[in-house]
Amino acid sequence: MATMVTLLLALQAQTALARTVDPIRAQQNILHYEFLISVPDTGSTITGFAWVHYRPMAPAGALTLDLDRAMTVRAVHGPGGPLVFHHAGDTLVIDSWGAMADSIRVAIQFTGSPANGLFIQQNARGRRSAFADNWPNRAHYWIPVEDHPSDKASVAWAVEVPAAWRVVANGRFVDSTRLANGRIRFRYHETRRIPAYTYVFGAAEMAVRPLMSPGGVRQSLWTFAEDSAFAVEGPFARVNQIADLFSEYIGPFPYDKLAHVQSSTRFGGMENAGAIFYTEDGYVSRRMGEGVVAHETAHQWFGDAVTERDWHHLWLSEGFATYFATLFHELAGDPDGFRRGIDGMRRRYLDSDVVDKPILDFAESDYMTLLNANNYPKGGLVLHMLRHQVGDHAFQRGVREYYETYRDSTALSQDLRAVMERTSGQDLGWFFTQWLTQPGYPQLRVTVRRPADSEAAAVIEIEQVQPERWGTFRIPVRVDIVNSRSGERAGTTLLLNGRRGDTTLRIPAGADTIEVDPEGALLMTADVRWSEGAGR
């Protein structure tokens, strides 16, 4: 019988899985941004224009954007001329121009020295550079945007920089133009709708190495000159294989190109759409590895193309990227590497300080705090367990359908559940409820009662002993009894759907080892013991 705690958790989950953003986020629909940014030769004060093309969702609705108070708005123009605007705190409100239309385009002139989000500074090699770094909602520190993942839009860039610099940004490279003042303007255009936290450009003196994968993914490596050889021979040696294997498993690569960029990001890697930024320190120290490349590349599908509609569903981004970075080893023909990766994910979660919280932690308001072991390794392990639950074929079909359905859009956890239920033919409500809305994990006490009569079957007793506040879990527990000398084994699977369960098994002669979950399919721990002389 389910405990009261488990019943309460299940009731709470009915709303938790479907929880989305504040309704105010649905009052407008941004269609497209165009930015013209001038990076100064000295200092950090930028000047810029933003053209915002949007569809008002209410008659004569005002346009509300996020923009840091440190940035100054000089003027705003609409279809009929100057518009009245109000910039207070971190909010820019632009009054309606007085008529309802299918879509409206406004122009915003602004300037300022960004306090965050865009960093104009000396890079790790001592040369001046400019790199954007927006996650989770730091784009508004330097450009006027709706700084939330729920309303995605396409974006075009025109970036003016010193003559010796090169610029990389989201989307397809359009052209570069030498200006009358000797500076250069680079233009890029991303036609797909992407979240604001991935709107970036990077500018510096950089070496560029173009790559084309056998599968047709156009890639390139952007590095400081001193670090080019390391990048090619080290972490990016298999970057073409990574992109091609993910494309084969998930679906076509989402964007026109993928640039891998050495940059000034606070993270080990940042999955900006079509232009991944990696921390410059990893190159200089020569400690950057292939794992971060696989992780950030997986984000191009999950996080960028399919974006969580609400930050609290971050596992749909980070859990997917964590799992696929590990799955790459299996797809590349290295099952042992895959198993090591899964074991490592399990250890990182079990050793973390968030096991007492659920993945869908709506009590957490600090988005940076959501970058934790629940959304990374536990989220990845949820996908691993889902794959075992529905089978390899249904899981891959579900992943492909999920990507195809929500590409260039947003999703919540129940959207993934609905897709997986269609492809597997299973009711997965219990699975998503327990793994996303309950804290913790199953802690098992497994007792094998070896019979005194060698002809009798052993009794296997399994009990969930985790704290009651975590609730109980429904899990298929595989137990194998092994003669370690001969290799002979016998096993059984018990569907545990409560605190306790038991089954029987005839064990091999001389059996001396008990293996619980030998395939590593579950997130759990097990205290295993023999008990002699018992029978049934």
Image: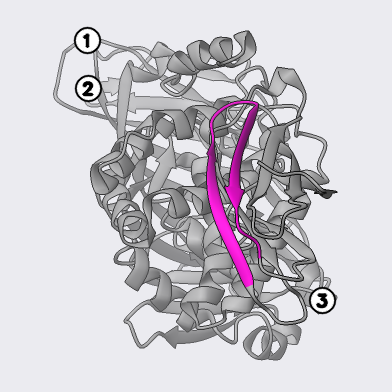
Label 2 element class: loop
> How far is mark 1 from mark 3, CA to CA?
55 Å
Task: Point out residue 61 in the picture as x, y percentages from the top left corner.
Answer: 28, 11
Residue 403 within the magenta-colored segment of the rendering: no
Q: Residue at x 70, y 78 (%)?
A: 224
State how far apart marks 3 and 2 are (Cα): 52 Å
Is residue 389 shown left or right of residue 103? right
- Amino acid type assigned to the residue bearing label 2 in the image: Gly
Q: Which mark is residue 98?
A: 1
Q: Is residue 309 left or right of residue 182?
A: left
- Residue range (magenta): 489-507
Q: Quadrant of residue 70?
A: top right
Mark 3 is on which residue type?
Val
Give the label, 1 or 2, closer to the camera: 1
Residue corresponding to mark 3: 284
Residue 113, image x, y percentages = 69, 39
Q: Residue at x 28, y 47 (%)?
A: 424
Which is more foreground, mark 3 or mark 2? 3
Q: Considering only vertical position in the picture, is 167 above or below 245?
A: above
Label 3: element kind: helix
Picture colour scheme: one colour
Left/right placement of residue 340 relative to residue 174 reads: right
Q: Which residue is mark 2?
A: 80
Q: Residues within 10 Å of mark 3 (few under 14, many from 20)?
A: some
| Residue visible at 72% across and 18% down in the picture | 469
